[in-house]
């Protein structure tokens, strides 16, 4: 049985991110995306604002290990282990990413992790 198209799209986006190609993933993001970051009280709204926020990736090296993907016509859930390195500092954490999909585009994304405080502290030192 072949993989659901939304699962295949998600895997492709994760492969692009893992290769460090943040801009290439933009082709799968809706212009009016609502993007919830781990531990953030407010989402990033819109593809342009999201891509600006991802300029932080220029300061880090990251590796994404996609454990599993489950998808249907409306949603994708990805289980990911992320390792992020900035100089001599590094953090590894697990996350569940939940994306709402419409017409092959991510319209909303939420991420949940096992250690929100450590993630926020790590990224706060960069910004």
Image: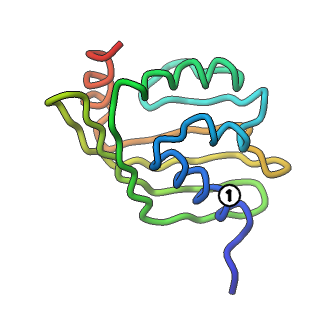
Determine whether the residue tagged by mark 1 lies in a helix, strand or loop.
Answer: helix
Q: Residue at x 32, y 23 (%)?
A: 123
- Where residue 6 sits, quadrant-wise, is bottom right
The answer to whether residue 78 is above or below residue 113 is below
Residue reaching furthest left? 88
Q: Position of residue 109 (x, y in %)?
A: 61, 39
- Residue with the most extreme top position: 127
Q: In the image, 62: left or right of 43?
A: left
- Mark 1 Cα shell of 10 Å, populated few (<14), some (14-19), many (≥20): some
Residue farthest to the right, as pictured: 103
Q: Which residue is drawn at 69% across and 20% down?
A: 48
- Which colour scheme appears in the figure? rainbow
Q: Is residue 97 above or below residue 55?
A: below
**At 63% across and 41% down in the image, what residue appears?**
24
- Write down the residue under mark 1: 9
Horizontal and vertical percent for residue 29? 71, 38
Q: In this view, does 101 lie above or below 127?
A: below
Identify which residue, 117 or 28, lies in the foreground. 28
Residue 94 image position (x, y, % from top left): 34, 49
Residue 120 position (above or below residue 93): above
Counting from the top left corner in percent of width and height, residue 118 is at 24, 30
**The N terminus: image quadrant:** bottom right
Position of the C terminus, as image quadrant, is: top left
How many circles with numbers are drawn on the protein? 1
Quadrant location of residue 113?
A: top left
Is residue 77 shown left or right of residue 88? Answer: right
- Which residue sits at x=85%, y=50%? 103
């Amino acid at each position: 049985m072949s993989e659901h198209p939304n699962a295949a799209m998600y895997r492709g986006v994760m492969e692009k991110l893992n290769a460090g190609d943040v801009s290439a993933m933009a082709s799968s993001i809706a212009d009016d995306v609502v993007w919830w970051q781990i531990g953030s009280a407010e989402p990033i709204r819109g593809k342009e604002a999201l891509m600006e926020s991802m300029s932080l990736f220029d300061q880090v090296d990251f590796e994404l290990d996609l454990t599993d993907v489950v998808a249907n016509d409306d949603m994708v859930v990805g289980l990911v282990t992320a390792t992020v390195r900035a100089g001599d500092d590094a953090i590894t954490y697990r996350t569940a990413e939940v994306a709402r999909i419409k017409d092959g585009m991510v319209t909303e994304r939420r991420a949940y992790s096992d250690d929100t405080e450590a993630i926020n502290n790590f990224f706060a030192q960069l910004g």
